[in-house]
Image (cartoon, helix red, strand yellow):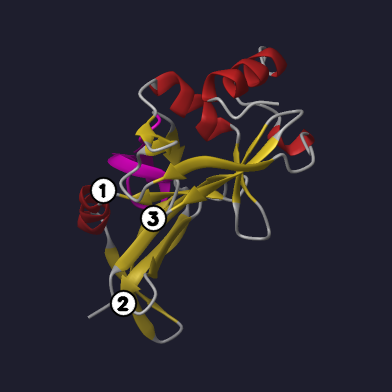
């Protein structure tokens, strides 16, 4: 077993050649240990103190990343499972795209690994606050417990297409996507 990014990438490639995403839900190896890998709040993947420069490895690792019930993040292959550290959300979302309008509107965000996610039941939008702060923490779920945090510019773009609605006697601000109203804040 190895904690070198290149070795882990090779194992994953060998086991997921025919699929665009590895079958992470079918892989359940025992914990191999802790890897000296940190995903910083600004989206950098730092291995043993140095940024991972190869974008293809970061993209691949984002497809084998899972957050489990214990709150920890793991890189999972068919034969290895490495716990890693994540400072905030492991991925970032930027570039909001709006198609359609009103009830048929679909909002999409692109992640820092190049994946496009449509806000909807498969990719849920949530806006919470950081602990002990009023600073919003907008996220979109990716898969396997992993989320992408919206960068400030993407959140501002989201607010620009928001509308106010009365829900249960309160005014809330939100956006429409895939036929659902996604709350992003309280109305004024």
Q: Residue 156 in magenta?
A: no
Magenta residues: mostly which secondary structure?
strand
Looking at the image, is 66 positioned above or below residue 15? below
Q: Is residue 160 above or below residue 65?
A: below
* Discs 1/3, front: 1
The residue labelled by disc 2 is 133
The answer to which of marks 2 and 1 sits earlier in the sequence is 2
Q: Which residue is mark 3?
A: 176
Residue 146 on image: x %, y %: 54, 48
Callout 1 environment at 10 Å: few (<14), some (14 to 19), or many (20+)?
many
Q: Residue at x 31, y 77 (%)?
A: 133
Residue 41 visible in the displayed image:
yes
Q: Position of residue 117 (x, y in %)?
A: 45, 38
Residue at point 75%, 28% (across, down): 78
Q: Residue at x 37, y 70 (%)?
A: 130
Position in image of residue 42 (x %, y %)? 30, 46
Q: Is residue 86 left or right of residue 134?
A: right
Q: CA distance from mark 2 to mark 1?
A: 20 Å
Q: Which residues are magenta?
A: 91-113
| Circle nearer the viewer, 2 or 3 | 2
Does 110 sit left or right of 144 as displayed?
Answer: left
Residue position for label 1: 154
Q: Nearer the viewer, residue 22 or 77?
A: 77
């Amino acid at each position: 077993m190895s904690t070198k990014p290149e070795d882990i990438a090779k194992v994953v490639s060998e086991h997921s050649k025919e699929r665009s995403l590895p079958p992470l839900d079918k892989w359940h190896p025992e914990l191999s240990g802790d890897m000296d890998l940190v995903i910083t709040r600004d989206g950098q993947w730092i291995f043993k103190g140095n940024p991972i420069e190869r974008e293809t490895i970061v993209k691949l690792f984002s497809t084998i990343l899972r957050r489990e019930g214990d709150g920890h993040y793991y890189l999972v292959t068919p034969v290895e499972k490495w716990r890693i550290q994540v400072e905030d959300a492991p991925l970032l979302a930027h570039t909001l795209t709006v198609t359609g309008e009103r009830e048929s509107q679909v909002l999409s965000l692109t992640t820092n690994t190049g994946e496009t996610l449509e806000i909807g039941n498969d990719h849920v939008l949530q806006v919470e606050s950081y602990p002990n702060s009023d600073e919003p923490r907008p996220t979109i779920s990716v898969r396997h417990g992993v989320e992408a945090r919206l960068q400030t510019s993407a959140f501002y773009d989201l607010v620009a297409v928001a509308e106010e609605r009365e829900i249960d006697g309160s005014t809330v601000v939100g956006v429409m996507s895939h036929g659902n109203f996604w709350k992003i804040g309280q109305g004024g």
